[in-house]
Amino acid sequence: MKFVKMQGLGNDYIYIDAINQKIENREELARKISDIHFGIGSDGMILICKSEIADYKMEIYGEISKVRAAVKAWKKEGLTVGFVPTMGYLHEGHKSLIDAARKENDRVVVSIFVNPMQFGPTEDLESYPRDLKKDAALCEAAGVDIIFHPEPEEMYADGFCSYVDMNGLTTELCGKSRPIHFRGVQTVVLKLFHIVTPDRAYFGQKDAQQLAVIRRMVKDLNVDTRIIGCPIIREDDGLAKSSRNTYLNGEERQAALVLNRSLKAGKALVDAGETRACVIKSAITAEIEKEPLAKIDYVDVVDFDTITPVEKLEGSILVAIAVYIGKTRLIDNFIVEK
């Protein structure tokens, strides 16, 4: 029996070609082959099988060349490609992006890459949650064709010194307290676009400033990819889905509900006809300050296209907040069209 063993971020899997080989007693084989004492040893076994919706159920690639080869083959057949860039530890918010990509494209690629370039020296790069096994299961169930899961060395070769930067849109909101963040985001996203060459790429509205920055970068640099923004997915109690929610203990998790509660207070004013940004900001700030565990990073009202502060709500407006709950920094927002 021929197989390949692949490893990344602490997880390893055994991949077996079940198209050209007859594999019997699959459950028993998975148990035996994954046993570290009596088998090869792995976190699980993945069979490459025939599928009714794709040539293969799913592939996980760590090499740029393999992703490029697969995408070129698809495009040679005239197939469209949807792309969802992520840092992993996937949840229902990511799945909503994958579902949108699956609906609108013939093939779907998801990248799982914790990008070191977008983390500051005191931020949570090392502690950022990772679970490739769980992520792979979610992606396969959602109909993803390829997971691109590179190591940092694959994305940033020795001597790497080329970056994508932007004036204006990256200086407000998150850019104030995370000055290198968006340079890292833009650089890795543009690299991923060059690798995957997607027809459409999907980003969540929760990271609204990132969405605005990527749209501007694509426009300015003539990238032939359509950027699709998707709605915020929330928990039943209103907290926006986020991989960083896992950092919260029970008391902090309850305190974090102040983010959505404060935005509802601001949105109620907008719905009632209020157009003064200062009034909306004051209402949101007052609600957050009622929570002892909350520390405000920012509460801002900006033009959604340019991410510049406004005094009056006109056009496309982003009302955005960043709040520390304990040591965990959470963001949330709503968008108004006037």
Image (cartoon, helix red, strand yellow):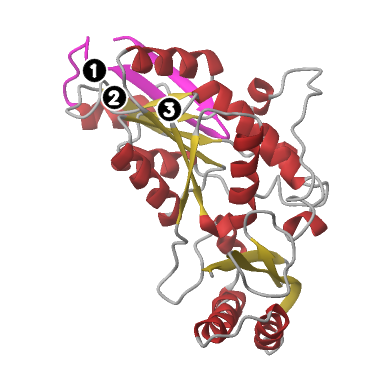
Amino acid type of the residue that numbered disc 3 sits on in the rendered structure: Tyr
Asked if residue 297 lies left or right of residue 332, the reply is right
Q: Which one is earlier in the sequence, the residue at label 1 or at label 3?
A: 3
User: Where 127 falls versus 238 (above or below)?
Assistant: above
Give amino acid for label 2. Answer: Leu
**How far across and how far down the image is residue 77, in percent?**
30, 14
* Residue 88 percent location from the top left of the image: 52, 43
Residue 20 within the magenta-colored segment of the rendering: yes
How packed mark 2 is, by other alpha carbons closer than 10 Å (few <14, some 14-19, many 20 or more), is some
Vertical comparison of 39 with 215: above or below: above
Alpha-carbon span between mark 1 and mark 3: 15 Å
Residue shown at 56%/35% (left/top)?
10
Can you tell which mark lies on residue 47? 2
Q: Quadrant of the N terminus?
A: top left
Mark 1 residue type: Ala
Q: How many marks?
A: 3
Q: Are marks 2 and 1 in contact (CB under 8 Å)?
A: yes
Q: Write down the residue under mark 3.
A: 13
Give the label on residue 169, or none.
Answer: none
Who is closer to the viewer here, 278 or 76? 278
Q: Which residues are magenta?
A: 1-25
What residue appears at the point 61 percent right and 50 percent down from the top-left corner?
212
Distance from the alpha carbon under mark 2 to that under mark 3: 10 Å
- SS at badge 3: strand
Residue nearest the viewer, comparing 336 with 295? 336
152 w.r.t. 67: above or below: below
Write down the quadrant of residue 142 in the picture.
top left
Residue drawn at the location 80% of the way across and 47% of the way down: 120
Q: Which residue is mark 1?
A: 18
Q: Earlier in the sequence, mark 2 or mark 1?
A: 1
